Image (cartoon, rainbow, N blue to C red):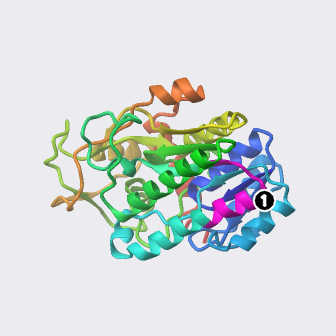
Amino acid sequence: MILVTGGAGYIGSHACVALLSAGEDVVVFDNFSNSSPKALDRVQAICGKPLAVVEGDVRDQAALEKALSEHGCTAVMHFAGLKSVQDSVAEPLEYYDQNVIGSHRLLRAMRATGVRKIVFSSSATVYGTPQFLPYTEQHPLKAVNPYGRTKLVIEEMLRDQHVSDPSWGIAILRYFNPVGAHESGLIGEDPKGVPNNLVPFVAQVAIGRRDRLNIWGNDYNTPDGTGVRDYIHVMDLADGHVSALKLLDTPQCFAVNLGTGAGSSVLDVIRAFEAASGRPIPYDIKPRRPGDIDAYYAATDYATRLLGWKAVRSLETMCADHWRWQSSNPNGYA
């Protein structure tokens, strides 16, 4: 049995599909503060298999210990936490509370119940401003915002725990930019309020929930002047988690990038989404936002060697799958 914290969220729900499809049993631990229980009903519909659900806050160590013990869990996938860079700048203490304190309580609960395998949802933001590209796992770690720093603190806590007890198996997965949705269109990204990320905003323009997209700068040192990012299909990302989990049967601690190894510009994404949806995406060019960088993308050769995994879905597939989700669910899970 795998405990999936934050399993009703965007990435967590897709990871649940991957786990159930791989024959694992799953119990989701989620407080539903930024997700919907409906996502879990749909996960079960996709897989034709049940999963267990425990409603609780990841900062509640007693509730975590109870869930781990009662369900006989042997490993954890840890997605629970806050994830907006912009919000983390405005509310850093809330981010340290939920992300760092929550992870600390989870590790204490795992230690208390004898569970010593964890796959952690980290982020490429731990690298900070690129000193070279593509980012390899050896790039200096220098997060430049509170969100990224919370991820870096958790990474260090995990590494320290493995040093203190080498019987732990710890996988630290540094995501690039997850997009897309399950091919069924039943689950996908459902941000509350104004989307912080490009693709869900584009999708809401296409479906008519928003009038226009703002492109923040077109004078970057990139082929078309707009920012370049490494977009990865959420199901490729989920499959990477299952591959990482399998390695933890042997106690070890590793950090690895999960990306495609290629960058796409904002205009690339807009063109791909227009092709997928058959609808125009009107946009305005606005001044650059402070802190935005020209480009970043992953080195992926280590992931291929270590996990036997690589991202296989194209930008066109990402946009087509996201549009299937958005057009079938114009208001998300509401």
Q: Residue at x 19, y 36 (%)?
A: 223
Above or below: residue 199 compared with residue 231 = below
* Residue 209 x, y percent position in the rendering: 43, 68
Observer-nearest of 113 and 60: 113
Q: Compared to 156, does 31 lie above or below?
A: below
x then y, percent, for residue 286: 18, 61
Give the left or right position of residue 116, taking residue 260 as reference: right
| Residue 103 in picture, x, y percent from top left | 58, 62
The residue under the point 46% across, 38% down is 257
Which residue type does callout 1 highlight? Thr
Place of residue 45 in the rendered image (x, y in percent of width and height, measured from the top left): 77, 53
Residue 67 forms part of the magenta stretch: no
Q: Is residue 64 visible?
A: yes
What span is colored magenta in the figure? 105-118
Q: Residues within 10 Å of mark 1 (few under 14, many from 20)?
A: some
Query: Which of the 4 quarters of the picture holds residue 23?
Result: top right
Q: Is residue 55 above or below residue 5?
A: below
What residue is disc 1 on? 113
Q: What secondary structure do most residues of the magenta stretch adopt? A: helix
Nearest the eye: 216 or 148: 148
For the residue pair 103 and 212, the one nearer the viewer reads as 103
Q: Quadrant of the C terminus?
A: bottom right
* 110 drawn magenta: yes
Residue visible at 30% across and 63% down in the picture:
212
